[in-house]
Amino acid sequence: MFPIKYPVPQSDPPKSPRETLPTMYDLPSENPEEPGLPDEFHDWQAQLLSLTFCPPHYPVEEVFCASDMNLYYDVRHALWYKRPDWFGVVGVPRLYDQVDMRLSYVVWQEGINPFVVVELLSPGKEKEDLGELAADTLPPAPSSLEGNGQTIEPPSKDKLPRKWEVYEQILRIPYYIVFSRYTNQFRVFKLEGARYQELELPESRVWIRELGLGLGLWQGEFQGVERLWLRWYDPEGNWILTEAEQERQRAEDAESRAEEAETRLESVLQRLRESGIDPDTFLEGQS
């Protein structure tokens, strides 16, 4: 899963292709300045976060969340953006202008910054996501952009703020969360004053009072994969169910109620038999 050196050293006997072929982290994507596209885990983990992100203090029409979406953060540099693995916003219309789905999230148009961002660590990107790199990169942009009669020049890389700096100092996002599926390490940084401070996580959970939600590590099966997942929970500490899980639970509850009713009926029939009454004869007489 981690980058390997080239040329690949030969061995006797030769290693299998599984051990020697490069992964997506070793190969460039169609965009030469991005190391790779989100993998299967990134997609599914983001889905689970979105499906269980239900802040009780806000109606569903005022909650928006997205994954791998361009987040434009500086009106003075309109081409600059970050692409969080997942982020959630509250107090903003679910649809842009209450009309259409978003193609991106532009903070100076929306008027509300994300409240929480989650980054899922990938091999080779740990330092970037944790604010330990000296520079960041952007995908290729046009040489200029026409807008409102003005020409906006593309950013120069030496001016680009790091992801950590954008979340902490520009957008002032209250909660920045990082999770590695390789180590199952779950870290939460809360904005305290001007800087992020890492929180201690008892039982690998964090309660976010402003949202009325908590986030923690849940061991279970999602999309057919059993592992530790990040998942939201309610004030009672119960994991919030997806719609599919709610439907399955309703079916199981209905089946359980039917079994209980059958058990009670059988108990009544047994008491009738013990009293010398043949329930079958009694029921035939009622028909």
Image (tube, rainbow, N blue to C red):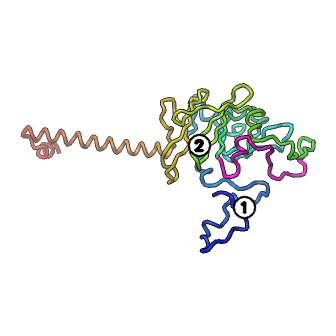
Dot 1 amino acid type:
Leu
Which of the 4 image quarters holds residue 171?
Answer: top right
Residue picked out by circle 1: 27
**Is 148 on the left-hand or right-hand side of 50?**
right
162, 12: nearer the viewer:
12
Secondary structure of residue under mark 1: loop
Secondary structure of residue under mark 2: strand
Residue picked out by circle 2: 185
Dot 2 amino acid type:
Gln
- The residue furthest front is 12
Placement of the N terminus among the 4 image quadrants: bottom right
Q: Residue at x 61, y 55 (%)?
A: 40
Q: Nearer the viewer, mark 1 or mark 2?
A: 2
Give the percent coordinates (x, y) of residue 10: 67, 71
Placement of the C terminus among the 4 image quadrants: top left
Q: 178 above or below 172?
A: below
Total number of numbered discs in the rendering:
2
Give the percent coordinates (x, y) of residue 79: 83, 44
Give the percent coordinates (x, y) of residue 4: 69, 61
- The residue furthest top is 193
Which of the 4 image quarters holds residue 273?
Answer: top left
Q: Residues within 10 Å of mark 1 (few under 14, many from 20)?
A: few
275, 239: nearer the viewer:
239
Which portion, as a residue range, is magenta? 121-145
Which numbered disc, 1 or 2, marks the residue that appears first in the sequence? 1
**Is 280 on the left-hand or right-hand side of 159?**
left
